[in-house]
Amino acid sequence: MSDVKAQLTEQLAEIEWSDLIPHAQRDAVIVVNEELSIVNVGVAIANDNVALVQQWIGQKLIHKPSFDELSDWNSQPGKKFSTLIVQPFVLVCAA
């Protein structure tokens, strides 16, 4: 698992919302609550840890962006997010 974590840590990037819009349009964006480590979420998804991912979903710690969030971000195209790609998803956390 540490190899996956190291690899994902290296891939962590800060990206503006305007660059994330195409991923949101294909319903691939997952919002990670700031209480969680985006890298740890990426590791859980990459390792297909269904139980942990479902737990986070149930606790509303990870979710698909709401209509209100998308509207807010679309009005701020320069808003920055920490992002991590774990195919087919793009994990985002407000920077």
Image (cartoon, helix red, strand yellow):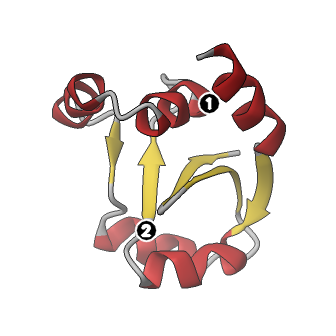
> Which comes before the other along the chain, label 2 or label 1?
2
Q: In which quarter of the image is residue 68?
A: bottom left
Q: Position of residue 5 (x, y in %)?
A: 67, 24
Q: Is 48 left, or right, of 20 in this rendering?
A: left
Observer-nearest of 35 and 46: 46
Single out the residue that lies furthest toward the left.
Answer: 58
* Residue under numbered circle 2: 28
Residue 74 at least partly seen: no
- The C terminus sits in image quarter: top right
SS label for mark 1? helix
Say what amino acid the circle numbered 2 marks: Ala
Binning the other alpha carbons within 10 Å of mark 1 as few (below 14), some (14 to 19) or many (20 upward) gives many
**Residue at the image position 70 percent from the left and 36 percent from the top:** 8
Q: Foreground: 77 or 83?
A: 83
Residue 21: where, in percent of width, then height? 57, 81
- Residue drawn at x 62%, y 30% as measured from the top left: 39
Which residue is located at x 44 percent, y 31 percent?
47
Q: Is mark 2 on a helix, strand or loop?
A: loop
- Counting labels gives 2
Residue 73, image x and y in percent?
55, 71
Against 38, is 16 above or below? below
Quarter holding the N terminus is: top right
Is residue 48 shown left or right of residue 2? Answer: left
Left or right of 26? Residue 43 is right
